[in-house]
Image (tube, rainbow, N blue to C red):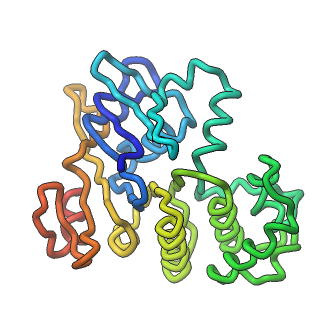
């Protein structure tokens, strides 16, 4: 089932200066997507656009920016910008969760309070009601149980990053966005976090979209990999381009990779290196 349907969208921060063109793209529900490509090609812009973090979209008569929510409603996401900040914030809180390389934790609160802050803000649970689930997730990603009651300022950088993952899991969402969320972590910890994330998404039928420069991490954990192309203008400036043909799929039965035409990819890492360079 589609989650996002996008077509003929130009993303720009300055009017008339496109940084990313989305030709035709469907993001399916219940999958873990990795976005790969060289720096400055529009991967973070894609996250900011879909996650309603910045008003970047310029639509034309053929454009589509549709979100299919869990009630089978189709929402034109671009129209939300005209409804004001309160409506935007409410929509993001209801449907989206975020993990960034910069954890954005609240320094005056404990680790436990930080992890369940989204639920407390919505008034859905108390700290004591959520403690068991939080500690179960902490155990899966090797966060010591005694970290729960400690101020986040007393935790290491790696522990704070893992804490941010738990917080993102606990926030009710349809789609989880991550922008280099494991960029500061060693490979063993990054793999453990991604395995936990993938299991969580699968068991809850949720979708994840992760920006990463780590091709091996994408090859090991993604259901789909979306690679960004670079287009050079006549003035030698560049912008990113994506469409449906640039999605690579993992066959769940054979665990092999396929391109958009259904042709098997023998060596996914080499294939991605070729595409991106």
69 vs 203: above or below: above
Of the pair 106 and 174, the residue shown nearer to us: 174
What residue is drawn where x is 13% and y is 61%? 262
User: Quick check: can you spot residue 111?
Assistant: no
Does residue 2 appear in the picture of this structure? yes
Query: Does residue 98 sit above or below 258 in this rendering?
Result: above
At horizontal 25% and vertical 77% (from top left) the residue drawn is 253
Tell me which corner region of the image, top left, top right, bottom left or bottom right, holds residue 224.
bottom left
Among all residues in the image, which is located at the extreme front?
71
Q: In the drawing, does residue 224 fall left or right of residue 94?
A: left
For the C terminus, the image quarter is: bottom left
- Identify which residue, 191 or 27, lies in the foreground: 27
Which residue is at 53% across, 79% downward? Answer: 192
Instruction: Determine which quarter of the picture holds residue 233.
Output: top left
Name which residue lies at 46% across and 56% down.
207
What is the quadrant of residue 254 in the picture? bottom left
Image coordinates of residue 101 in percent, x first then y, are 59, 58
Q: Is residue 225 above or below residue 246?
A: below
Q: Position of residue 12 (x, y in %)?
A: 42, 27
Is 253 on the left or on the right of 160, as rendered? left
x and y, in percent, of residue 186 in the image: 54, 78
x then y, percent, for residue 229: 25, 46
């Amino acid at each position: 089932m589609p989650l996002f349907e996008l077509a003929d969208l130009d993303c720009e921060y300055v009017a008339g200066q496109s940084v990313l063109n989305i030709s035709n793209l469907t993001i399916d529900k219940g999958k873990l997507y990795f976005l790969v490509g060289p720096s400055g090609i529009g991967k973070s812009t894609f996250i900011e656009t879909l996650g309603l973090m910045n008003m970047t979209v310029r639509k034309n008569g053929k454009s589509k920016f549709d979100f299919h929510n869990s009630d089978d409603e189709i929402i034109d996401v671009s129209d939300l910008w005209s409804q004001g900040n309160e409506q935007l914030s409410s929509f993001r809180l209801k449907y989206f969760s975020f993990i960034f390389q910069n954890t954005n934790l609240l320094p005056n609160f404990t680790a436990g309070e930080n992890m369940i802050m989204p639920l407390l803000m919505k008034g859905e649970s108390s700290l004591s009601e959520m403690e068991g689930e939080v500690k179960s997730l902490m155990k899966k990603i090797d966060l010591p149980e005694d970290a729960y009651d400690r101020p986040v300022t007393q935790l290491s950088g790696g522990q704070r990053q893992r804490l941010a993952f738990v917080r993102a899991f606990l926030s009710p969402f349809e789609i989880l966005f991550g922008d280099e969320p494991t960029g500061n972590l060693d490979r063993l910890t990054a793999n453990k976090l991604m395995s936990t994330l993938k299991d969580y998404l699968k068991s809850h039928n949720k979708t994840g979209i992760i920006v990463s420069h780590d091709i091996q991490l994408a090859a090991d954990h993604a259901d789909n990999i979306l690679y960004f192309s670079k287009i050079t203008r006549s003035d030698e400036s560049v912008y990113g381009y994506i469409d449906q043909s640039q999605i690579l799929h993992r066959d769940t039965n054979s665990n092999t990779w396929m391109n958009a035409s259904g042709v098997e990819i023998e060596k996914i890492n080499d294939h991605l290196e070729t595409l991106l360079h």
